[in-house]
Amino acid sequence: MYFILATGNPHKVEEVRRILEPLYIDIVPQSEICPDLEPEETGSTFAENAEIKARAIYEATGIPTIADDSGLAVDALAGAPGIYSARYAGEQGNSRKNNEKLLRELSEVPEEKRTARFICSVCVCFSEDDILHCEGCCEGAIAREYHGDNGFGYDPLFMVGERSFAELSGEEKDKVSHRGNALRKLAALLKERKENEQNVGF
């Protein structure tokens, strides 16, 4: 199977490929097919934004498209930054500024109230009328300082047990992360779909 992945983020591409390649699913980044297409994310939920991106790229290319929308929800901030995670500090994709704003917002929050979760909603658009959704979550807490050099985004601040996402290897992160959980669900659905297609008529 061959899909466009609706992102130009190489970290996301790497994570998705690690999990879906065992199913012989080929992933081609949007940046290689339609790099200038930037759908406006006007949805009010992760699922809505994921579908907006998947539909837009499918409509432009006619190729089945996988899109995800993910973010960080902090309990002490009433779920913020949420769908605005990538532009929390105002500038799209500036991880350093986003992390610094998060640390400032939580500077007076005690350890027991720094709980948070990463959420990932994945959408696959096979056609205009054939849409698939699944979602994954990872519970954790926000640290008071940066930990680790791996990962991207809020990974250095998001603690899962004694380590941050940025202190985990790619394989370790995949086992517990929101995106890993969502993509495993997607992999199971795609496998089931493929088996059902093969059994049609028998």
Image (spheres, helix red, strand yellow):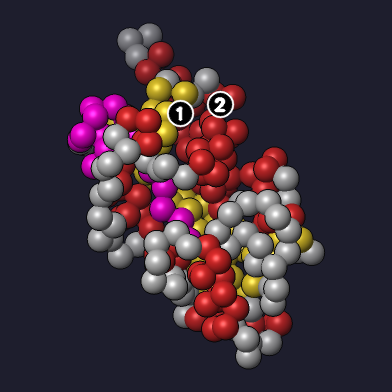
Q: Compute the Cα span from label 2 to label 1.
A: 8 Å
Which residue matches tag 1?
27
Q: Amino acid at mark 2?
A: Glu
**Residue at 51 percent of width and 69 percent of height:** 98
> Is residue 86 part of the magenta span, yes or no?
no
**Residue bounds of the magenta highlight:** 56-71
**Residue at 26 percent of width and 34 percent of height:** 58
**Residue 32: x, y in percent?**
37, 30
Q: Secondary structure at mark 2?
A: helix
Q: Is 104 on the left-hand or right-hand side of 57?
A: right
- In the rendered structure, which disc, 2 or 1, sits on the residue that comes first in sequence? 2
Tell me: residue 21, above or below residue 68. above
Which residue matches tag 2?
21
**Residue 93: x, y in percent?**
45, 59
Q: Is 75 on the left-hand or right-hand side of 80?
A: right
**Residue at 35 percent of width and 62 percent of height:** 45
